[in-house]
Amino acid sequence: MNNLKIKKVGQDVIKLESIALAKLARSLGKDFVKAVELISQQQGKVIISGVGKSGNIAGKIAASFTSTGIPAIYLNPVDASHGDMGIVEKNDVLIILSNSGETHELSDLINFSKKKKIKIISITSTSKSLLSKNSDINLILPSHKEADKLQIIPTTSTTMSLALGDALCCSVLSLRKFDKKSFSELHPGGKIGKKLKTLSEIMDTDIPIISTQSSIIDAVLIMTEKKYGCVVVLEKNKKIKGIITDGDLRRSISKVNINEKATMIMKNKPIIASSDLLISSAIVLMNKYSITSLIIAKQNKPVGIVNIKKCLEND
């Protein structure tokens, strides 16, 4: 097989699966809405189960739910039949994946759940299967062909199941008004957690401040003490009037009396940010305006300050 033929096989697989995903999107209806509402309202955890390739997909869906603040766990139905059934508790929701809906390993888990009156959501390809008949909500995958040349390897079906799981998770997420701050709290480590950190997590509240009555020498002393290369000038109401940077001082030092008011060399309307601004966005902001320190303010009153070095260390 030459390179062009290999490439075409890959393209055909992706095209076939993308067509199936488009059909899946069009097929979502009332049962999907019911499933999202059931998961969103559940008082316990979401248990997701499947055998073989479906089990692998179930594990990924469970991980997605957990990462968005919804307690979820993957339960191998074979393990459930040999002692792990105790994981299933009152108020849980059970999601079972099976393309055929006739996987015999699922029977014990289904029977136990029905006895405990656990709600079951099925993801399967037929509404006439044993699984569908024993489920409270059926999410039926539209008719499809597996992507391999024999049309027997779980490919298209598992891709659709994974996408449907993502759709459930993201829809529940929208209902629960889960935001970046919530996500960050669940991902304190790693690249994702760092990307979601905000200025409130790294800002210094010991801000270099002077009043409108302060002199230029006062500004020099405070700037030297705080080591941020700037001072924030405040009005009597504690709101920000302006800013003086070390650059402003250097450019004006030979032209002014250091005992004169600092407002003479002050810049009005300094660049400020809110405490919930992402660190990555703060870096972009500082680079845009060629500044090395950023004032964090609320209602134009300073609450903190950061420099670009601190931001880069945490980005």
Image: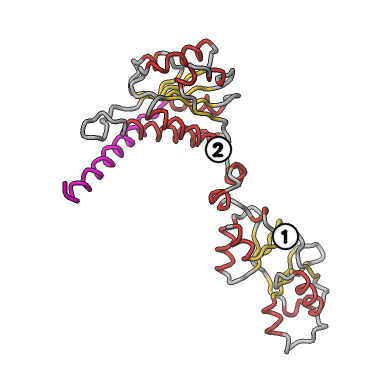
Callout 1: SS: loop
- Inspect the magenta stretch and tell me whether residue 30 lies in it: no
Residue position for label 1:
204
Residue position for label 2:
68
Tell me the kind of residue under disc 1: Asp
Q: Residues within 10 Å of mark 2 (few under 14, many from 20)?
A: many
Is the residue 259 above or below the residue 303 in the image?
below
**Residue depicted at 51% across the width and 18% down the height:** 119
How many numbered marks does the figure carry? 2
Residue 23 at x, y percent in the picture: 32, 33
The C terminus appears in which quarter of the rendering?
bottom right
Residue 179 at x, y percent in the picture: 58, 43
Going by the image, does 40 lie left or right of 14?
right
Residue 273 at x, y percent in the picture: 64, 60
Range drawn in magenta? 1-29
Mark 2 or 1, nearer chain start: 2
Residue 171 at x, y percent in the picture: 49, 34
The secondary structure that dominates the magenta segment is: helix
In contact (CB < 8 Å): disc 2 and disc 1: no
Q: Quadrant of residue 229?
A: bottom right
Tell me the distance, in whole angstroms, between the alpha carbons under discs 2 and 1. Answer: 30 Å
**Residue depicted at 83% across the width and 74% down the height:** 213
Tell me the kind of residue under disc 2: Thr
Callout 2: SS: loop
- Inspect the magenta stretch and tell me whether residue 19 lies in it: yes
Is the residue 139 above or below the residue 177 in the image?
above
